[in-house]
Image (spheres, grey):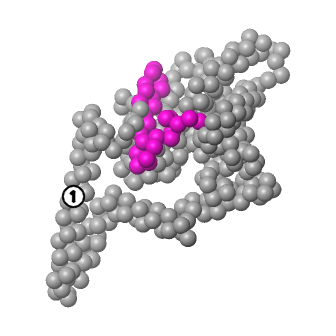
Amino acid sequence: MIGDTMTLLSLLGRIMRYFLLRPETLFLLCISLALWSYFFHTDEVKTIVKSSRDAVKMVKGKVAEMMQNDRLGGLSVLDAEFSKTWEFKNNNVAVYSIQGRRDHMEDRFEAAADYVKAHLPDSLKQQLQAFEREKRESVLSYASILEQRILAVDREMLDKLSANHDEAGTTCLVALLSDRELTVANVGDSRGVLCDKDGNAVALSHDHKPYQLKERKRIKRAGGFISFNGSWRVQGILAMSRSLGDYPLKNLNVVIPDPDIMTFDLDKLQPEFMILASDGLWDAFSNEEAVRFVRERLDEPHYGAKSIVLQSFYRGCPDNITVMVVKFKSGARGSNKAGE
């Protein structure tokens, strides 16, 4: 009963956000009520029409104010709503991240995400350096190194967090750039997409969602189940079927840390840029929309990362939103680079 109530409240909340963030919808409602008022001349309807018009003006003013503040380079309106906003830029990489409508910033400031950030890049870098020194004799590959390091970090994190009864979990999306190849490892529902030389969107990863046939069968074989609570969830809890951390579900073997790894030929694709982003972005944008949006804004200071984050928020995204944009340049293929 409580779950049903929460689902209803969640649905009502989404409906309200839809109306509040889309003044044109309220405007259409005003037109409908106005026609009703004209034909039936009811004072009650006239009052509703006036109130609706006032609401439209208020919401339009609020959105205009937020967009104006952003154009002026400030975040005064957003700062009041986002307790943690984070940005980064270095050479050809830019990141922008906001808490958005969530009560907490889980994309970055959370135990599991912090642990992976602190341990995975360094351990990955060390093994890659060793691999480069012994490349001709090694039986390893970039894909196998990524898989080994991701699984190792998950085991270490499970030992640490479970000892503290910390049930935190995180997605993991890693892009490794070598001379002629891009290798992408993904765990969870963060997603990567690349813009090729013709402006086409090329998926770099595929989300791990409980409703997918492969994942659903695996969960069932492990003795688990999925149920719908706003979205399909493993054991009615987690909205993704693979993650790092989440030790209670790992103990049941219904959630696993195994990454999917894909390799791409850079000479063939000749990419302009790639986007690595948390699921908050993909709640508001398709791969193709995101590529078009960023491609038109590559000359901006954050290569379009900040703009697409804020646009996702304006579209009503209820989640944290983190976006990294990596611009490819002529010298980028001359050395190995890894993006997390």
Residue closest to the eye, 176 or 172: 172
Position of residue 220 measured from the top left corner of the image (x, y, whole percent): 77, 58
Q: Which residue has dot 1 on it?
A: 58
Which amino acid type corresponds to the residue marked 1 in the rendered image? Met
Classify residue 167 by image quadrant.
top right
Residue at figure coordinates x 24%, y 51% from the top left: 62
Left or right? Give the position of 114 relative to 216. left
Residue 6 shows in this picture: yes
Q: Is residue 133 magenta?
A: no
Q: Tag count in the figure?
A: 1
Q: In this view, does 328 lie above or below 317?
A: above
Residue at figure coordinates x 63%, y 36% from the top left: 164
Left or right? Give the position of 142 relative to 204. right
Pick the quarter of the image with the C terminus.
top right
Left or right? Give the position of 26 relative to 191. left
Residue 243 shows in this picture: no
Residue at figure coordinates x 37%, y 39% from the top left: 83
- What span is colored magenta in the figure? 87-112
Classify residue 251 by image quadrant.
top right
Residue closest to the eye, 63 or 255: 255
Q: In this view, does 16 lie above or below 184?
A: below
Q: What element carries label 1?
A: helix
Residue closest to the eye, 141 or 80: 80
